[in-house]
Image (spheres, rainbow, N blue to C red):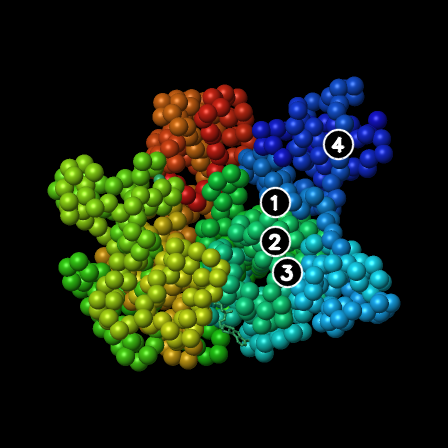
Amino acid sequence: MARARVLLLNAALGPLDYRIPHGMTARPGSIVVAPLGPRQLVGVVWDEESFPDVETVGDNRLRNLLEVLDAPPLPETLRRLIEWTADYYLAPPAAVLRMALASMSALEGTRTVIEYRATGQLPDRMTEQRTQAMERIGDRQGLVRELAMIGGVSDTVIRGLVKAGAFEPIEVSVDTPFPEPDPAHAPPALSDQQMAAATDMADAVRAHEFAPFLLDGVTGSGKTEVYFEAIAAAIRAGKQTLVLLPEIALTEPFLERFEKRFGTVPVNWHSGLRQSERRRAWRAIAAGEARVVVGARSALFLPYPNLGLIVVDEAHEASFKQEEGVHYHARDVAVMRGLIEHFPVVLASATPAIETRHQVDLGRYREIKLPARFGGAQMPDIEGINLLTDPPERGRWIAPPLVVAMEEVLAKGEQSLLFLNRRGYAPLTLCRHCGYRFQCPNCTSWMVEHRLTKRLACHHCGHVIPAPRFCPECKEEDSLVACGPGVERIADEVKALWPQARVAIATSDTLHSPARAADFVKSVEAGDIDIIVGTQLITKGYHFPNLTLVGVIDADLGLEGGDLRASERTFQQIMQVAGRAGRGEKPGHVFIQTRMPDAEVIQALIAGDSERFYLIETENRRRANAPPFGRFAAIIISSEDSDEAAQTARLIGKSAPQVEGMRVYGPAPAPLSVLRGRHRHRLLIHATRQVDIQSVIREWLGNLVWKSTTRVAVDVDPYSFM
Ligand SMILES: Nc1ncnc2c1ncn2[C@@H]1O[C@H](COP(=O)(O)OP(=O)(O)OP(=O)(O)O)[C@@H](O)[C@H]1O
Ligand SMILES: [Zn+2]
């Protein structure tokens, strides 16, 4: 009897055995529907040897598979990747599988509609309407309704023409195919250095072998142009390419550049797609027809049958790390996919992660350097402003030297960018009279004032309230004060200083859709904006040749809290935002406002000495046995019931195994101790590379039980310590 082991889309379940009924063909990878109790679930037939521990069920107790869906089977290599990801990040395989089957509507199979087109045959009887319709429609093809519109007649007239043999039916898929990018459309003339880099990568693409690259080029060196040549090589080799971007906001400018180079936009995959777009993209990807896909990290698990290259752009960005559900790092899983499927993976960044540089040092990744900007543009010069000796006026945030510099730039008709990584107007609102502070009812966080929308918002859970007029505690009116600056407040200050200047705020609030982002880029390019005030959203990827001044309002912000990567992140963010200045013919200047001018990272930034920063930071990590030398994992316990969360945390803490080379810290209440109404506790596990941390944790937690209302999440290689 034919049996199948099936991984159902239910994270609480392991694989289950089913009977393949007579006449049905199902093999590993087949996407199927199977009964579970009274329900029907989608799943994938899996390789039996992958789950040797599953208890075999007797033939007579098996239920029949119901259906094999009309979609390409999941490739074997993708099944291996799903297993690896589940194993490494200690996630249920079904939760990883869900990311591969990311469009339920795509699994419903091919969907067709009937369109009509002229046969060239004239009907026996012609009427005025028929003549008009046939003339206007010409050789166009469409649904009856569409043809009636084009012809300016009723549906009945078209149906009559069909009956009379003047139009014939054609069955077409509802999923219109995507146009193919043309590698020869508009290749740029590369500089010698760029050419050498491009050739290296294109050769690797043609070799069809695993080859991880770090494309380490300074801001404005033309990394995009260079990896486009690797993409061109993949297209020519008949392979698919995936480009991962850290944020949807960066997609618009990317699409535009891609279209200029390849004559058409790539297939776009992100969380904002409508269901029909998702379906169309998924089916084109799974059929191997989507040649180049650009997407956020979730595009990584899609079932490309024929991948030949992955590019991870801005590869240092922390947003490639998913912080809920499966806690995976898309950069690292991308490299693993390249290894399993034998193709090169390019990590592009002007400020590579310490982890990535370390892989280069170990000889595992190849580094390709682009040390100079394209077209003779110079790197900007960077200057520190000591806020202790040169403070802004009371109630202001822009220090005098920066004001002077902005004044000059404005007078020259050039653009400036002020960077502050805080959305909204003010991060905290308090009552001057009684000291009351507005806090989120669901989270351990302050409500952030958004003056543009007249609301207070929690940036963790999205809770909003209308901007209050009086204190809810003491009922005093006009007693509420905004504490500290956000970008909106900086924009107000700019407008007060230069009422004639045209100011734009660039954050995820103002550029929340691709269309808004595109409008913003256009107006900056057209010179309709003088001063941009933005968060980290604006620090990378953008290319505005007339932007010559960058001011960092508070360089110390990211150093507070001091987690493992605080210095590194600060360095990357400021290098990136500095990299927006002087990308055209005019030189760029950068001012960094700081209260810690002697901090190592600030010194390295001012000296423009990346190497020194990397050296010192890497040494610090080595001494602390922190990643990439040692390893961390976190266990996060959460529950709506505070006692229950604390109890489970204690239980897990008490059961911590003694393992050589491993230490367990905590449990302790998380810094973000309440999030979305759940009370949180954390344990941190620190181990040497020799410890098989996954096995240890699997065994440790596997022996424990806790209430189903408590959630226990494991975060391997954590980026957030909140
Ligand atoms: N060979 C070339 N021919 C024409 N234009 C080029 C070439 N190389 C780079 N450019 C242009 O120079 C500008 C900077 O290049 P690009 O944006 O690719 O740099 P980058 O290294 O990705 O920078 P960042 O890391 O700051 O995003 C772009 O406008 C790009 O089109
Ligand atoms: Zn909240």
Position of the C terminus by quadrant: top left
Numbered badge on residue 277: 2
- Residue 463 vs residue 443, the one in the foreground: 463
- Identify the amino acid type marked 4: Leu
Q: CA distance from mark 1 to mark 3?
A: 18 Å
Numbered badge on residue 102: 1
Indicate the secondary structure of the residue bearing disc 1: loop
Q: Position of residue 272 (x, y in %)?
A: 52, 52
Please name the residue that numbered disc 4 is placed on: 66
Q: Position of residue 40 (x, y in %)?
A: 67, 30
Check if mark 4's residue and mark 2's residue have beta carbons within 8 Å: no
Indicate the secondary structure of the residue bearing disc 3: strand
Which residue appears at 42% of the width and 75% of the height?
Answer: 526
Indicate the secondary structure of the residue bearing disc 2: helix
Front tag of 3 and 4: 4
Q: CA distance from mark 2 to mark 3?
A: 16 Å
Position of the N terminus by quadrant: top right
Against 436, is 650 above or below? above
Indicate the secondary structure of the residue bearing disc 4: loop
Horizontal arrangement in the rendering, residue 299 relative to residue 44 (left or right)? left
Q: Is mark 2 within 8 Å of ligand 1?
A: no
Q: Is mark 4 within 8 Å of ligand 2?
A: no
Horizontal arrangement in the rendering, residue 91 relative to residue 158 (left or right)? left
Numbered badge on residue 292: 3
Q: Position of residue 715 (x, y in %)?
A: 48, 38
- Identify the amino acid type marked 1: Ala
Counting residues from the N terminus, which is met first, the one under dot 1 or under dot 4?
4
Front tag of 1 and 4: 4
